[in-house]
Image (cartoon, grey):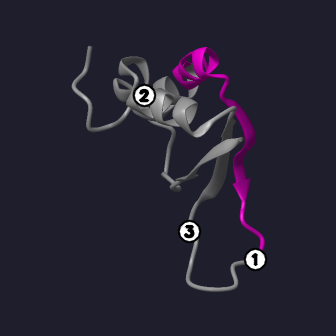
């Protein structure tokens, strides 16, 4: 069954090196797990409850296990802001 990773791109005043590196490298981390973007950075047009001060990202994976394996993979973890630089 298809599984989804949902995230948001918080607005930043400028695209700094960290964000540009993330955007350039993320696709290569998705490919081995069958991940594909369904929505990438779409602005939200209407929020019915609460707030959503960011752009929506939805990534589809063939299975839940693929989604978890992608997120836990070393290549993706090195892209996260809290990860040590390599």
Which quarter of the image is occupied by the N terminus?
Answer: top right
Q: Where is mark 1, residue-wise?
A: 46
Left or right of residue 3: residue 26: left
- Image x and y of residue 23, in percent: 56, 29
Q: Where is mark 3, residue-wise?
A: 53
Q: Is residue 69 above or below residue 9?
A: above
Q: Where is mark 2, residue-wise?
A: 17
Which residue is pictured at 56% across the width and 78% down the height?
51
- Start-end of magenta stretch: 25-45
Circles 2 and 1, Cβ within 8 Å, touching? The answer is no
- Image x and y of residue 31, in percent: 63, 17
Q: Secondary structure at mark 1?
A: loop
Which residue is pictured at 66% across the width and 28% down the height?
35
Q: Is residue 8 above or below residue 46?
A: above
- Image x and y of residue 13, in percent: 49, 52
In this view, the mark in front (2 or 1): 1
């Amino acid at each position: 069954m298809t599984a989804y990773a949902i995230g948001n791109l918080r607005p930043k005043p400028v695209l700094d090196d960290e964000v540009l590196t993330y955007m350039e490298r993320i696709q290569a981390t998705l490919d081995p797990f069958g991940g594909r973007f369904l929505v990438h950075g779409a602005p939200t047009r209407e929020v019915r409850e609460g707030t959503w001060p960011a752009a929506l990202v939805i990534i589809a994976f063939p299975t839940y296990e693929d989604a978890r394996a992608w997120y836990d993979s070393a290549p993706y973890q090195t892209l996260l802001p809290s990860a040590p630089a390599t």
